[in-house]
Amino acid sequence: MNILYKTYAKASGSGRDGTATIEDGPLTLSLSTPKALGGPGGEGTNPEQLFASGYAACFLSALRFIAGRQKHKLPEDTSVTVTVGIGPRDDGAGFALDIALAASLPGLDGKIASKLVEEAHATCPYSHLTREGAQVRLSVA
């Protein structure tokens, strides 16, 4: 794969209760484990929120790309909502994510909107990740 952009994030502390820093940008986040996962809750962000935000933004970008390629003008108020749940896997070997994606394309013909969403799902790298997984290179620093 020809990598066009790469970023780095570093988590420290106790994982879900600590900080995450984007190494090539001005972003540092406090992390908090949600009460539903046995944590204190609080004002910090959690990995599921970060994944949902990234997926929603990336999918909206893919949707706009596909629409432009097909000469469809998306409404300005087009939006994508990604809902991410986490729970124990059925095999008992860890946890898994449950993901729902809803695209809102107000005023666009339903058949056209559905086709654009399907094609954006085939194009978006986050969607590809959810379908095919990703190769992860492990190392110890």
Image (cartoon, grey):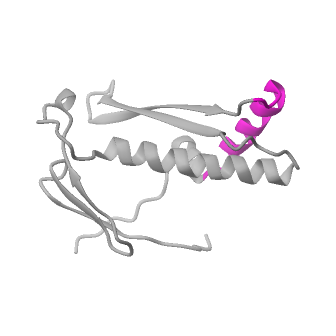
Magenta-drawn stretch contains 99: no
Q: Which of 77 and 64 lies nearest the eye of the viewer?
A: 77
Q: Which residues are magenta?
A: 107-124
Q: Which of 116 and 122 lies nearest the eye of the viewer?
A: 116
Q: Which quadrant would residue 79 be assigned to in this image? A: top right
Name the residue rendered at 66%, 42% in the picture.
Answer: 121
Q: Is residue 111 left or right of residue 5?
A: right
Decide whether the magenta segment is chiefly helix, strand or loop: helix
User: Can you name the residue that lies furthest to the right here?
Assistant: 71
Quarter of the image with the N terminus in it: bottom right
Quarter of the image with the C terminus in it: bottom left
Q: Position of residue 139 (x, y in %)?
A: 29, 69
Q: Which of 39 and 98 lies nearest the eye of the viewer?
A: 39
Q: Is residue 77 left or right of residue 92?
A: right
Q: Position of residue 119 (x, y in %)?
A: 74, 42
Rendered view: 77 above or below 69: above
Q: Position of residue 94 (x, y in %)?
A: 26, 36
Magenta-drawn stretch contains 119: yes
- Residue 136 in view, yes or no: yes
Q: Is residue 138 left or right of residue 35?
A: right
